[in-house]
Image: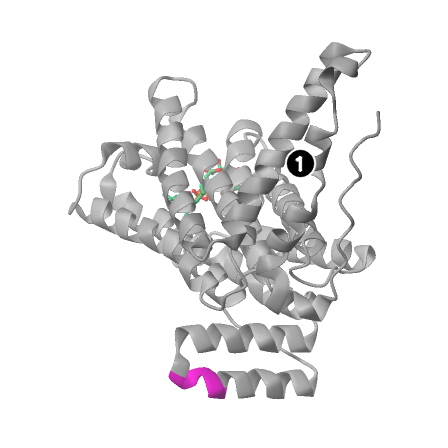
């Protein structure tokens, strides 16, 4: 029996990515031949009934998935649906870890760091579901903003949510929510509004904060005893190596995903490996310094990573300028002309730099 034809590989001109990216999933989704495969497969005729039924289930699931993505993409409320899904997902995800810590499945510190390590990248992956509308990035930013308000309300005592306090504080003190966790969501807002999916700087910043810093704690607490850093005994070589590997790996994964979806131009592998290595190393050094009482590492680590990414992994000038212009037009209409002019002028000069 003939297998379903594979969906055609989509190769998008890099500079078109900024405008067309959001609808790409919608456009590509429905052309997959899944429904035809489902109807064209007579189960009874199969010489191996079990294999045939497995294939049928696979095809049905695929068809439903394609239909779902197609319907979502075609809806005028697409961005609102994605926003609502991500906002509810954030609450459910944090509650899940609270539950796992409360019933003893996970140690509380590990649960907290898993929240730290996972929520950022999952949120970033939801960016791919938003439309190409210039307001999409602002709607996406509502998700961390809602979490900001929640953390602020619970941290200041305006609202009571012991589950949230248990999930994200170290000691059960609600005022801790006003420190690391609050900076964490502010960084997610900044990455969404300023970088979005047109530029890998946001992905890299989030990866260093989550995959890097998150893993440093998880590994450092377990394997860091006996190998303190020479200049900071509170941190370890094991933790820093984990930060380097985790930050690099998560950045590489997210960049590969977003570039394969056509949101920005892919880099030559050698350049990507080298530049990501340098960025991950710099972020690791920053994380290892004893500077946390002056600047929270949810700001210093992603800040350095984003700044270096903009320098080492620039996107084509026109795409970057278009991204800046569309963000400015959406956020501050009055300032749009000036910012766009600055970006275009910088692009013309051959060195576009977006700043966090
Ligand atoms: C525990 C957290 C930070 C602590 O940082 P540090 O002090 O250890 O340096 C992370 C707090 C996460 C926050 C409560 C929830 C953030 C949700 C996110 C904006 C959206 C996720 C959506 C997705 C669908 C799961
Ligand atoms: N580079 C690192 C970072 C953290 N760690 C371990 O993780 C713990 C928490 O790290 P941290 O104070 O940076 O925690 P956060 O501020 O990131 O939550 C440290 O006390 C170390 O045990 C490490 O061993 N090496």
The image shows residue 137, relative to residue 236, as above or below, that is below
Quarter of the picture holding the N terminus = top right
Is 55 in front, or is 331? 55
- Residue at the image position 22 percent from the left and 44 percent from the top: 154
The x and y percentages for residue 60 are 63, 28
Report the residue that reaches farthest toward the left: 158
- Residue under the point 57% across and 49% down: 207
Q: Main secondary structure of the magenta part?
A: helix
Magenta span includes 31: no
In magenta stretch: residue 336: yes
**Residue 349 shows in this picture:** yes
Q: Quadrant of residue 244?
A: top right
Classify residue 331 as left or right of residue 271.
left
Look at 50% across and 37% down and name the residue there. Answer: 217
Whether residue 295 appears in this view of the structure is no
Magenta stretch?
A: 334-338
Q: Is mark 1 within 8 Å of ligand 1?
A: no
Q: Is residue 11 left or right of residue 152?
A: right
User: On the image, numbered disc 1 is attached to which residue?
Assistant: 35
Q: Give the residue displayed 45% in from the left and 58% down from the top.
A: 76
Horizontal arrangement in the rendering, residue 225 relative to residue 262 (left or right): left
Label 1 neighbourhood size at 10 Å, few (<14), some (14-19), many (20+)? some
Per the image, label 1 sits on a secondary structure element best described as helix
């Amino acid at each position: 029996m003939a297998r379903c034809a594979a969906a055609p590989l989509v190769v998008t001109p890099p500079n078109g990515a900024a405008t067309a990216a959001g609808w790409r999933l919608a456009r590509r989704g429905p052309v997959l031949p899944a429904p035809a495969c489902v109807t064209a497969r007579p189960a009874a005729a199969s010489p191996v009934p079990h294999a045939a039924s497995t294939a049928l289930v696979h095809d049905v699931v695929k068809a439903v998935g394609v239909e779902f993505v197609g319907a979502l993409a075609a809806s005028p409320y697409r961005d609102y649906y994605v926003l609502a899904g991500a906002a509810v997902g954030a609450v459910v995800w944090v509650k899940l870890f609270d539950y796992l810590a409360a019933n003893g499945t996970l140690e509380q510190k590990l649960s907290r760091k898993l929240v730290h390590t996972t929520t950022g990248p999952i949120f970033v992956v939801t960016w791919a579901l938003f439309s190409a509308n210039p307001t999409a990035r602002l709607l996406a930013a509502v998700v961390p903003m809602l979490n900001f308000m929640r953390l602020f309300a619970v941290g200041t005592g305006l609202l009571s949510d012991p589950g949230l306090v248990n999930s994200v504080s170290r000691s059960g003190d609600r005022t801790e929510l006003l420190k690391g966790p609050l900076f964490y969501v502010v960084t997610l807002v900044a990455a969404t509004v300023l970088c979005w999916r047109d530029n890998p700087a946001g992905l890299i910043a989030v990866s260093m904060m989550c995959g890097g810093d998150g893993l440093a704690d998880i590994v450092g607490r377990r394997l860091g005893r006996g190998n303190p850093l020479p200049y900071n005994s509170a941190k370890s070589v094991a933790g820093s190596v984990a930060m380097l590997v985790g930050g690099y790996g998560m950045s590489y994964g997210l960049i590969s995903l977003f570039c394969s979806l056509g949101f920005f131009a892919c880099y030559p592998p050698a350049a990507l490996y080298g530049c990501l290595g340098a960025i991950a190393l710099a972020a690791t050094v920053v994380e290892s310094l004893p500077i946390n009482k002056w600047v929270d590492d949810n700001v210093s680590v992603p800040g350095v990573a984003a700044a270096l990414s903009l320098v080492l992994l620039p996107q084509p000038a026109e795409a970057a300028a278009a991204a800046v212009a569309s963000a400015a037009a959406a956020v501050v209409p009055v300032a749009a002309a000036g910012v766009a002019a600055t970006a275009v002028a910088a692009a013309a000069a051959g060195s576009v730099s977006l700043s966090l």
